[in-house]
Image (spheres, rainbow, N blue to C red):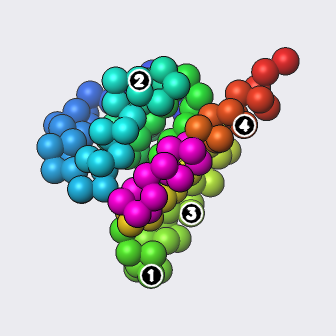
Amino acid sequence: MEIHKYSSNKNEFKQFRKILRNNSTSAEATLWDLLKNKQLDGKKFRRQHSLENFIVDFYCSSDKLIIELDGDPHGDYSKILKDEARDKYFKANGYKVIRFENRFVFQDPELVIETIRKNIYLINKTTSP
């Protein structure tokens, strides 16, 4: 199934997205402070944005970049499989997904931002003529 522009931020998920934004994890809130208001190279990011039937943590539409924050790296195996399937789905539809463990947002925020920046550069490099 291909993701189309009209399937972005479906109204039926509006209340759930609002709840997620109002109950952000501390890692999400910290990363949002670094991404909001086009602070990262003028790129506009949205948080808790829906694409098809998924809600992603952060999304930059101009670069089709999805950023996900994950908790315990030794998490539930079924959750890991679900995340892998979700990432595969997005990749098949032209999106780039990058994931960070929550702890990296606190331990090395500069590395997180530089990794995001590098991914944006690579996306633009491969899509430019």
Q: Amino acid at mark 1?
A: His
Please tell me whether residue 108 belongs to the stretch shown in magenta: yes
Estimate the spatial distance between the alpha carbons at disc 3 and disc 4, rounded to whole Å. Answer: 21 Å
Residue 57 pos. (x, y %) = 37, 46
In the displayed structure, 51 sits above or below 98; it is above
Estimate the spatial distance between the alpha carbons at disc 4 and disc 2, rounded to whole Å. Answer: 19 Å
Mark nearest the camera among 2 and 3 is: 2
Mark nearest the camera among 3 and 4 is: 4
Number of marks in the rendered image: 4
Mark nearest the camera among 1 and 2 is: 2
Q: State the SS at label 1.
A: loop
Quadrant including the C terminus:
top right
Q: Which residue: 18% across, 38% down? A: 18
Q: Which mark is residue 124?
A: none
Q: State the SS at label 2.
A: helix
Q: Report the residue marked by disc 4.
A: 122
Quadrant including the N terminus:
top right
Q: Report the residue marked by disc 3.
A: 84
The reply to whether dot 4 and dot 2 touch (C-beta < 8 Å) is no
Q: Amino acid at mark 4?
A: Leu
Q: Report the residue marked by disc 1.
A: 74
Q: Which residue: 41% across, 23% down? A: 38
Dot placed on the residue nearer the N-terminal end, 2 or 3: 2
Q: Which residue: 16% across, 50% down? A: 23
Estimate the spatial distance between the alpha carbons at disc 3 and disc 1, rounded to whole Å. Answer: 14 Å
Magenta stretch, residue numbers: 104-116
Q: Report the residue marked by disc 2.
A: 38
Dot placed on the residue nearer the N-terminal end, 1 or 2: 2
Q: Is residue 14 visible?
A: yes
Characterize the magenta stretch by its predominant secondary structure.
Answer: helix
Q: Amino acid at mark 2?
A: Lys
Name the foreground residue: 42 vs 70: 42
